[in-house]
Image (cartoon, rainbow, N blue to C red):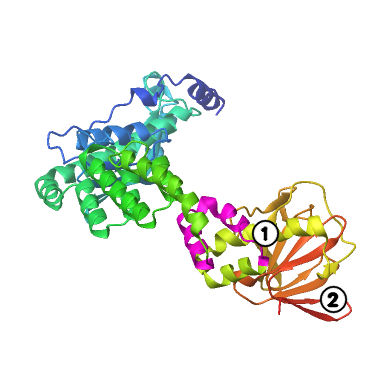
Amino acid sequence: MRYLTIFLCLLIFTGCASFNPQNFSLGVNTEKKLPDLNFNYEKNKNYSKLLNEFASQVCANSSNEYGEKYGSADLKVLYLKEKRNAANVGWMLPSLLTACTLNLLGFPIFSYKAECQVSLVIYDAENNIQKNYQSKATGTVYNAFYWGYSLMSEDRINAANFKAIDNALHEINSNLEQDNFELANNLTSTGKIQEIAHKKALVAGTVEAYDDFLSKYNYGRLAEDIQNKKIDMVYAAANKVNTKEGYEKFLSDFPENKYAAVVRDKIESLDQNYSEKLNSAGSLKDRADLILQYPDKAKSVIDNIQDIAEIEKMVHNYPKIQNTVIPILENRILQQIREKGSDDRFCIKNISTLQGPAHSITLCQHESHYTFVEDFEGDKIYLRNFKERLPLAEGSIHRYNGRIVQNEINNIVFESNTDKADYLTFAVFKELGYVYLRGKGKVILDSGKEIQLGE
């Protein structure tokens, strides 16, 4: 027994074989190449080299992402594990009977076996499964003097794993060889992925469909065709709206295109016409139309309206400009309060304010609590210590949508069940407190008293 123990110790440390994954070559070699496919496989495993070699053997251009593909292939190692090896009894028995003399001549004392299952699923360009291959295989290595692996070496595990995968890929390749003619014919008759995607994008005929195509295929003549069609569509939309803002965004998105010179002329013409139109805009409708056409000039249009009630009327009569006009209106009222005071506006005194920049935000009821929403241009959710907080700096604007108990404003309830044109709106002032700006709703004080606003 002592001699056997010594022998095993020697075997543990004196196995000569070593294993380097980079030196292991896949034995698969086929002359029957499939049409070019997108091969998908794990690229961060130590056996990924085998999968890459297999893909290269099956498809000549599988690694070329810009090639014209006729489909895709998913190559996966579904499992890879050690397999119980009953043959070890057969190796150990002669060793024991000969007091390990045979082993000194190179006879194995143990073997290590790995088992795996490899899957190859091939899809055509329409993403239909053409073939589904499954292969289970084993790989065996030996623990022996001179030519085998050490008992404690990781190399024996890696070598067995590689052999198992290699054997599974051989079996799959053999089936591929038999099916090659039928499979290649089915793939080529269905067509190329990019051509089919191109046809689908054209049928959809939307900017979203074009963007989806270009995100996947941003090369070649078909990509150029889709890009040109997208430019045509975006230009047509900008031309229909006919605003400086729309044209400037078009040039920002597509700096060099066949419409660039025309668009620059249109911007120049709009700038020249704006002053004339502003001077001749006598009615609220004229001014609303001017804001629609020149959204970047909205503030100057509003500044020419002296009566805040007229601006409110514009907000309610012309919904298309609400998102642009309401923030301007809020700041107009805010500035008026700063200059002239709150007068007879409802005001909640003695609130705690904070230092920092002002934020405007909408508070929306959500079950038993509320959430912050950026409803209008310029809105910004206030973060403190990486958490959303109620902005309480001087000049901050709060709009209420729903029934909200405001713990940070003396536990007062704010209730407003209207559309966004009439959200109950308050502003924070360091000296004046929490001042009502505009909108419809009611405030319920902690005494239970209800105050109706905006009626």
Q: Nearer the viewer, residue 305 or 230?
A: 305
Q: Which residues are magenta?
A: 283-308
Mark 1 crowdedness (10 Å alpha carbons): few <14, some 14-19, many ≥20:
many
Q: Quadrant of residue 169?
A: top left
Left or right position of 299 against 338: left
Q: Nearer the viewer, residue 98 or 213?
A: 213
SS category of the residue bearing label 1: strand
Q: Residue at x 32, y 45 (%)?
A: 214
Amino acid marked by disc 1? Ile
- To which residue does mark 1 refer? 361
Label placed on residue 260: none
SS category of the residue bearing label 2: loop
Q: Residue at x 23, y 44 (%)?
A: 225
- To which residue does mark 2 refer? 445
Q: Quadrant of residue 407?
A: bottom right
Left or right position of 444 against 265: right
Tell me which numbered mark, 2 or 1, is placed earlier along the sequence.
Answer: 1
Q: Nearer the viewer, residue 173 or 116?
A: 173
Can residue 151 be found in the magenta stretch? Answer: no
Indicate the position of residue 315 as horizontal and vertical percent values.
58, 68
From the image, give the main secondary structure of the stretch colored magenta: helix
Q: Residue at x 37, y 32 (%)?
A: 141
Q: Is residue 364 visible?
A: no
Left or right position of 77 against 315: left
